[in-house]
Image (cartoon, rainbow, N blue to C red):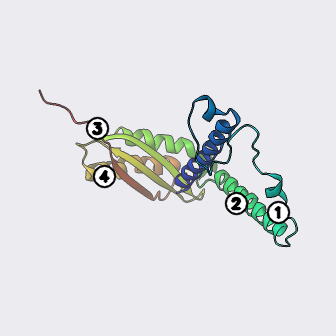
Amino acid sequence: MRTVVNRVLLGLTGLVLLVLGLSVLVGSLNLQQHWDFTLPHWWPYMNSRDVLLTKHDRTRYRSHDWWWPSVIAALAILVLGSLWWLLAQLRTKRLRQIRVDSGDGQGALLRGRALESVLTSESEAFEGVEWANTALVGKRGTPQARLVLGLAPHATPDEVLANLDTSGLARARTSAGLDALPAEARLRPVRHKPSRVT
């Protein structure tokens, strides 16, 4: 969800900046005169002497009581929204370390990326799996695995899930000394171009 929101916000911001930049560029370089085309009457920059805000636009609301509180409130909302978005980027749900019982009463910490890498490589070795992504979430003592598997057209989902449960997840549980490793697997078809028969 966060990735989709990021892409939409980035796309909208880029589009707005592109339109504003092109409008300023057309006006400041007098491209309509050099390339002999006309601009609509509402176009904000007709030539290089035009400014973003005229003196009248800059000062017309200054005497109104609502103007400055509105400007400050809008800027505060913009800053708080930007900070919230930045903090959302830094916060990750991925599990960085897993607590492993080493048998000496102390315990050990296993890097989450190491276990993710093993689960990914084992999943990609199954028949019919073309690619795999793994993420560990939850708490150190009770991790959960989330897998996304790209299945080839000839793959059998039942066999892939059975192999994942009996082979990949079982080995991960045993090697990490976990009582349980709940997993959620999402299966996605891998699209291929149709082959021509001659």
Q: Residue under circle 3?
A: 192
Q: Residue under circle 2?
A: 81
33 and 141: which is toward the camera: 33
Q: Which residue: 59% across, 43% down?
A: 39
Name the kind of residue labelled 3 in the image: His
164 and 167: which is toward the camera: 164
Whether pointer 4 and pointer 2 mark residues with C-beta atoms closer than 8 Å, the reply is no
Q: Residue under circle 1?
A: 60
Q: On the rendered structure, is 1 left or right of 54?
A: left
Q: Residue furthest right?
A: 63
Q: Which residue: 77% across, 60% down?
A: 75
Q: CA distance from mark 4 to mark 2?
A: 45 Å
Name the kind of residue labelled 2 in the image: Gly
User: Within 10 angstroms of label 4, few (less than 14), some, or many (20 or more) residues?
Assistant: few
Give the image location of residue 70, x and y in percent.
79, 68
Q: CA distance from mark 3 to mark 2?
A: 41 Å
User: Within 10 angstroms of label 1, few (less than 14), some, or many (20 or more) residues?
Assistant: few
Q: CA distance from mark 1 to mark 3?
A: 61 Å
Q: Residue under circle 4?
A: 162
Q: Is residue 128 above or below residue 3?
A: above
Looking at the image, tell me whether mark 4 or mark 3 is earlier in sequence order: 4
Q: Is residue 17 above or below residue 146?
A: above
Give the image location of residue 137, x and y in percent.
55, 55
Name the kind of residue labelled 4 in the image: Ala
